[in-house]
Image (tube, rainbow, N blue to C red):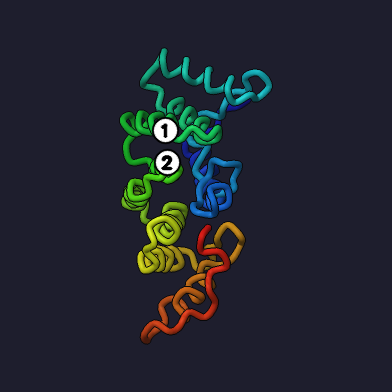
Amino acid sequence: MAKSSAKEQAGKKNNALVYGIVILMAGALIGFAFSTAFQSTKGQGDAPVQAQGGDMLGQIKVYSDRVALNPQDVNAWVTLGNLYFDTGQPAKSIEAYSRSLELSPDNPNVLTDMGVMHRALGEFQKAVDTFAKAIAVDPRHETARMNTGIVLLYDLGDKEGAIAAWQELVRINPQAVNANGTPIAEVLREMTGKAPGAAGGEQKLLVPLSNPAN
């Protein structure tokens, strides 16, 4: 299989992970790894080799051997992190992503996926902090902003913080949608009772969230 550049794969994973995790992880995050359900940024490293007919455990073995032989192979570390992400091994995924960031700091896609993995471990504040690092690197990183709002609202109970995160997302991309395809601008209208950026005080919530527990 031909290798894709780190940048090309990063974009693919990033667009997939954020919105994917929302569905896969109790509707809480948006990421790229879990089969594009939450939308993560998976795909930043080398394209995983098709070891044993595409078996992920085989791929993990291949990339574990690769980083053992060459600990400076940043793409291999990212790919290994992605494989652990996809196989539901968040602690190992975080470790691999951390190693990649030691070699190539400030990768917003890796940081976003790492935040998703922190959330999977129940480390909600670490997740938000990691998304914030991604946003600091790339202020227009939509996945990081979407995931920030999800964790704030559903995991930390910070409705105002979630609203602020999603208002900024809509400012960056007025057409942004959640995992169900609902425009974020519409979600904000339901949460605040007014259009994003509208003047005046907060009004009564027009329509409650369909399932705030998720």
Residue 92 visible in the shown view: yes
Residue assigned mark 1? 91
Q: CA distance from mark 2 to mark 1?
A: 8 Å
Residue drawn at x 62%, y 19% as measured from the top left: 51
| Dot 2 amino acid type | Leu
Q: Which mark is residue 111?
A: none
Residue drawn at x 50%, y 47% as measured from the top left: 31
Q: In the rendered image, which quarter contains the N terminus?
A: top right
Residue 169, given in percent of the width and then of the height, sits at: 44, 63
Q: Earlier in the sequence, mark 2 or mark 1?
A: 1
Residue assigned mark 2? 121
Disc 2 is placed on an element classified as loop
Q: With respect to residue 84, does 35 lie above or below? A: below
Q: Is 77 in front, or is 123? A: 123
Mark 2: give few (<14), some (14-19) or many (20+) Cα within 10 Å: some
Q: With respect to residue 149, does 40 lie above or below? A: above
Q: With respect to residue 132, does 202 lie above or below? A: below
Mark 1: give few (<14), some (14-19) or many (20+) Cα within 10 Å: some
Q: Residue furthest top?
A: 69
Q: Is 197 in front, or is 21? A: 21
Residue 26, given in percent of the width and then of the height, sits at: 54, 51
Residue 162, given in percent of the width and then of the height, sits at: 40, 64
Asked if the residue at tag 1 contacts the one at tag 2, i.e. Cβ–Cβ closer than 8 Å, the answer is: yes
Residue 171, given in percent of the width and then of the height, sits at: 43, 68
Q: With respect to residue 114, does 171 lie above or below? A: below
| Dot 1 amino acid type | Ala
